[in-house]
């Protein structure tokens, strides 16, 4: 069925839950990683458990040796056409933890794309040499088109989106949920929690991906602070509300925190992404006053309120916040490596083996 599917039919299938499973899963597990919506609660729990198993095995002498053999002989292409430090290095470190070999292309002007090669031909060529492709691209549909092309080929390999234009950043949202799960481990988990997301939501792929993923939990609340021109798109709000989740939107951080600050369990700060605007010099890329999480706002929230940021940050989250007990940004960064290693294990069918070894060594329940 999928081999004869047109690209428009493939894109359409991604909007339907049942159809998504047909095109993005294989043998009962996620294969291509493109959207937050494709993951069910059981997928998320399994990924988080695998990430924890990898993290603990990596600290164990026997466990570390075992991990290095999990993907030994596998080759992973990291195709990054957008500037990236954390995401690229996180994926590379994750592959290395599991013993995979990595290659990276960052300058597409030195590749056949500069000669006009199509996405379809390029990824089918790469699939001859590699066992998975990680893609970060400025075009919204690059990863989607790559996955479609490979599903129609004789050698389909997983495509993992590392950020697609202004669309989604699914692996970022997965590491964010892993960080929330860790942070709320002694407070009943993510269910029922209130998460505040700050930024230009309509064009911030990390913010939107996290909002989509929150719908997989029981009765959370998702609040937003955003400039009026970049409020969450109606489709996103409707999707969240369809899952019975309360949504609130304010135009300033101060008004939100003065009204709801004590009930907020986590604040997810993002910068205003002025690089998408025309004009603005680099020195003007900071957030304006209503979207800076000022240090005096600490008195409006609880000490156990989790504070996160996907990075890079400019001025929107002052350094003084690192003194806040709930500040977990640097743990969040490191968790990116663990969750991306878990994703590699999942798409290659090695996650159950990893959890089994960790249980045998009494590293996880």
Image: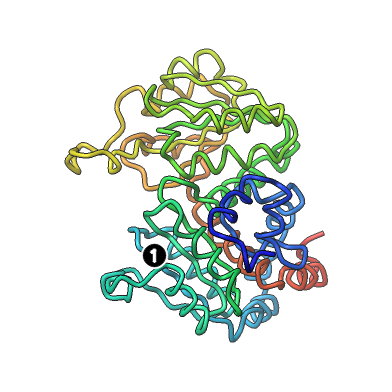
**129 left or right of 137 in image:** right
Q: Residue at x 50, y 48 (%)?
A: 168
Label 1 neighbour load within 10 Å: few <14, some 14-19, many 20+: many
The part of the image, by quadrant, that contains residue 356 is bottom right
Quadrant including the C terminus: bottom right
Q: For residue 148, what is the image quadrant?
A: bottom right
Q: How many numbered circles does the render carry?
A: 1
The secondary element bearing badge 1 is classed as strand
Describe residue 274's horizontal placement relative to residue 193 as left or right.
Answer: left
Give how far across and how far down residue 116 sits, in percent: 30, 70
Residue 154 in the image: x percent, y percent? 61, 79
Left of 173 or right of it: where is 139?
A: left
In the depicted view, which residue is nearer to us: 168 or 363?
A: 168
Where's residue 364, x and y in %? Answer: 77, 61
Quadrant in the rendering for residue 23: bottom right
Residue 359 spot, x, y in % from top left: 81, 67
Q: Is residue 59 visible to the viewer in this orientation of the structure?
A: no
Quick check: 288 above or below 57? above
Vertical order, 19 against 313 (above or below): below
Q: Is residue 125 above or below residue 188?
A: below
Residue drawn at point x = 37 percent, y = 73 percent: 105
Colouring convention used in this rendered image of the protein: rainbow
- Tell me the residue that label 1 is attached to: 80
Q: Nearer the viewer, residue 35 or 95?
A: 35
Could you tell me which residue is drawn at 69 percent across and 58 percent down? 47
Please state which of residues 287 and 275 is positioned toward the viewer in this rendering.
275
Q: In the rendered view of the protein, which quadrant contains the N terminus?
A: bottom right
Residue at 59%, 70% in the rendered image: 152
Which of 64 and 102 lies nearest the eye of the viewer? 102
Measured along the vertical axis of the image, is residue 360 above or below residue 43?
Answer: below
């Amino acid at each position: 069925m999928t081999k004869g599917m047109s690209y428009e039919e493939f894109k359409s299938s991604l909007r339907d839950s049942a159809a998504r499973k047909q095109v993005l899963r294989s043998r009962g597990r996620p294969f291509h990683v493109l959207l937050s919506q494709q993951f069910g609660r059981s997928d998320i729990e399994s990924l988080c458990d695998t990430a924890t198993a990898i993290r603990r095995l990596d600290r164990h002498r026997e466990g570390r040796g075992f991990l290095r053999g999990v993907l030994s002989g596998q080759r992973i292409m990291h195709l990054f056409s957008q500037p990236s430090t954390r995401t690229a290095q996180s994926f590379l470190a994750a592959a290395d933890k599991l013993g995979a070999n990595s290659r990276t292309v960052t300058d597409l002007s030195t590749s056949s794309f500069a000669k006009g090669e199509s996405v379809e031909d390029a990824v089918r060529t790469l699939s001859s040499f590699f066992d998975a492709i990680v893609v970060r691209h400025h075009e919204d549909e690059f990863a989607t088109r790559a996955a479609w092309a490979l599903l129609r080929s004789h050698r389909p390999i997983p495509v993992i989106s590392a950020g697609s234009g202004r669309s989604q950043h699914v692996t970022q949202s997965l590491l964010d949920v892993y960080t929330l799960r860790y942070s709320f481990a002694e407070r009943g988990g993510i269910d029922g929690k209130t998460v505040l997301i700050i930024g230009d939501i309509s064009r911030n792929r990390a913010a939107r991906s996290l909002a989509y993923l929150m719908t997989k939990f029981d009765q959370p609340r998702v609040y937003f602070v955003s400039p009026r021109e970049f409020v969450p798109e109606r489709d996103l709000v409707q999707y969240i509300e369809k899952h019975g989740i309360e949504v609130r939107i304010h135009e300033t951080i101060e008004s939100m925190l003065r009204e709801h600050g004590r009930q907020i369990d986590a604040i997810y700060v993002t910068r205003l992404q002025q690089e998408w605007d025309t004009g603005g010099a680099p020195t003007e890329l900071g957030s304006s006053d209503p979207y800076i999480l000022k240090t005096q706002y600490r008195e409006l929230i609880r000490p156990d309120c989790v504070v996160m940021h996907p990075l890079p940050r400019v001025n929107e989250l002052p350094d003084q916040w690192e003194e806040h007990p709930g500040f977990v940004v640097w743990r969040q960064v490191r968790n990116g490596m663990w969750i991306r290693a878990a994703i590699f294990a999942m798409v290659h069918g090695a996650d159950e083996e990893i959890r089994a070894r960790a249980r045998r060594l009494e590293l996880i329940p």
